[in-house]
Amino acid sequence: MAALRLYAQLVSASLRAQMQYKIDFIVSTFLDAIFQAVDFVLLAAIMLRFPEIAGWTLYEIGLLYGMSWIAMSLYRTFAPELHNFDRYIVQGNFDSLLIRPWPTLMVLLSRNLELRKIGGALQGALVFWFSASHLLRSGRLEWGEVAILIGLSVTGTLIPFALSLATAACSFWIVRSGDLQTFTMYAPITASQYPLSVFPGWLRALLSSVLPVAFINYVPVQYLLEKGGSAWSLVSPPVVSALCLIAAYSLWRLGERRYHSTGT
């Protein structure tokens, strides 16, 4: 409980500092949402020419897109320091975390909140609601199913967080992990915005196992739209999220024990 109170206090201090520049916060949040919307606008333009992609309509893909961006943006909001963790290793700043009487990961996460990334989550939520509303009117989804998908969008945040934590942990061995993020974060998250059925078999297997972004959105959406899967498709996402988090934190602890500082 003491650790949680400390985390809340540090986060509160970070929020107060950022709210000193309210106009900057509003503008940057709005621009972040606009930039993220470009991807969906381009996708929608393509879908106007091709009504379906591998049997998926624009509104069905919109569910995938919205859930993916909600999860990714919430992760980037609450863990920006983790996303750029390799600089702590390069500059030797990780030493300052080790001397604190608190878990290093908790101290790292409490150092900063990138509130402007909320714009991406709001944009994802708008696309999700736009798509879900149409599917509700057409009878493809029910209100209870939409509520399930909203809940899974939030719990799905743990998957990009776990992937980022594992990537950050690799910095203890390889030091710079920026290029690795392209393969463990950016490419998989981008792929999760589309139906996995459009990808070759080996890539579908990869995105459903080692880099399980399919459980953020595709697995439950596929089942609720009656495109495959079973009732387990609604239970597996939070289970997989929890397992990914445990595995990533174990790797973090292993790397933390091997850390030898910069030597300067």
Image (cartoon, rainbow, N blue to C red):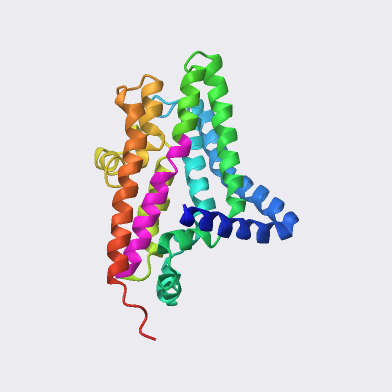
Q: Determine which quarter of the picture holds residue 256.
A: bottom left
Left or right, residue 203 beside residue 138? left
The residue depicted at 41 percent of the width and 68 percent of the height is 86
Range of magenta residues: 153-173
Q: State whether residue 2 is above or below residue 207.
A: below
- Name the quadrant of the C terminus: bottom left
The residue sitting at 40% across, 55% down in the picture is: 164
Q: x%, y% of residue 217?
A: 41, 34
Q: Position of residue 23 (x, y in %)?
A: 75, 55
Let me know if residue 165 is in the magenta part: yes
Q: Position of residue 227 (x, y in %)?
A: 35, 22
Compared across the picture, whether 108 is left or right of 19 comes to left
Tell me what residue is drawn at x 32 percent, y 37 percent: 239
User: Up-down: is 18 above or below 73?
Assistant: below
Q: Nearer the viewer, residue 185 or 190?
A: 185
Q: Position of residue 71 (x, y in %)?
A: 47, 42
Q: Nearer the viewer, residue 93 or 167?
A: 93
